[in-house]
Image: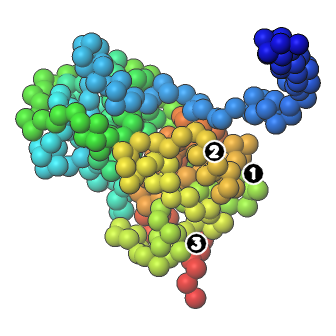
Amino acid sequence: MNWSNKTKRVYQIIALLAVVFSACEPTPDAMPEKKKALQHPAPVYHSLKHLVSIDSLWQMQADSVPFRLVDVRKAASYLEGHIAGALCISRSDFGDHTNFPYKGMAAQREVIADLLGSLGIRPNDHLICYDAKGGSDAARFWFVLKCYGHPNISLLDGGLIGWKKAGFPVAQKPVKVKPSSYAFATEGAPEMFIRKEEILPLMNDTNVIFVDTRTRDEYTGERLKSGATKAGRLPNSILWEWGNAVSLDSDACFKSAKDLAYEFSSSGIRPEKQIVVYCHTGTRSSHTWFVLSELMGFRNVRNYDGSWSEWSYFEDLPFETDLE
């Protein structure tokens, strides 16, 4: 056998071995780990209908898509720099300052309608709200308007923090408005709110989970925040800080659905339960309501409007602290 024949024989043997090994390769049914991964894909957001990304907003501006931006911050911060075209609404603008001895309650429906009309907003305008603190104030405004019946309102994922981090410009010039006559287009969903009187009967219901979205020191009673008459929490509440849902140390965008699902599951917050969220004045809990209902698809979540500011005001209501 000359050298060329030896070479041919080597290649023939290699080809034969390749056929043998390929025949021995496990089929998909014989690969349980791979099959399991395909059967359980990473969770995705339940809906993005009411969430607009930074890039999407920039493209909407470029394509002249009709919408109205709402900057939910104090006027002084707005004038220092805002997204061009944004209206300015502060938290105090949509709070009730006359009907309660404590702060934080949402203003009545007709007051909100007058506010929107004063800014030239129309019933069918697509509103995109943002702030510069992770979305809690914007989510409060979103929640109130959704509850009262404005049909088309979204949050800007990342808000002004994400907008700046992406390198997009800001403006200092305020927007001129022409007031309009505003009336809510739908009846809304008042059941999104839960009142103090509705909470007491649920205290011992094992199917109900109370979620405190404040900071740990507020939850334990170590911190008495202004506006409350005492420190503490609703009995049997689970602590889940609202900021867990966003990347506050970077672009202030919402975390992935996979991370959020893990956060809630590990905290015992399950979708089959009835969830009541609260904070100090219903603002941070509005953000958590948005995450649970809009992003994660929980079907039975209600936001306690009065939250701890109201609950602490009444001496006969039960509460807990970790203090001796």
Of the residues shown, which amino acid type is indicated by label 2? Answer: Ala
Q: Quadrant of the C terminus?
A: bottom right
Above or below, 219 against 5 in this view is: below
Of the residues shown, which amino acid type is indicated by label 3? Answer: Phe
> Considering depth in this image, is 108 or 297 the residue closer to the camera?
297
The residue lying at 75 percent from left, 51 percent from top is 207
The residue positioned farthest toward the bottom in the image shown = 324
x and y, in percent, of residue 310 in the image: 45, 62
Q: Residues within 10 Å of mark 2 (few under 14, many from 20)?
A: many
Which structural element holds mark 2? helix
> Considering depth in this image, is 200 or 176 the residue closer to the camera?
176
Q: Earlier in the sequence, mark 1 or mark 2?
A: 1
78 relative position to 273: left or right: left
x and y, in percent, of residue 296 in the image: 60, 37
The circle drawn on residue 261 is 2
212 relative position to 265: left or right: left
The residue lying at 68 percent from left, 55 percent from top is 266
Figure quadrant of residue 36:
top right
Q: For the residues marked 2 and 3, what is the alpha-carbon distance in whole angstroms?
A: 29 Å
The circle drawn on residue 309 is none
To which residue does mark 3 refer?
A: 319
Q: Is residue 274 visible?
A: yes
Q: For the residues marked 1 and 2, what is the alpha-carbon distance in whole angstroms?
A: 20 Å
Figure quadrant of residue 181:
top left
To which residue does mark 1 refer?
A: 207
The residue positioned farthest toward the front in the image shown = 2
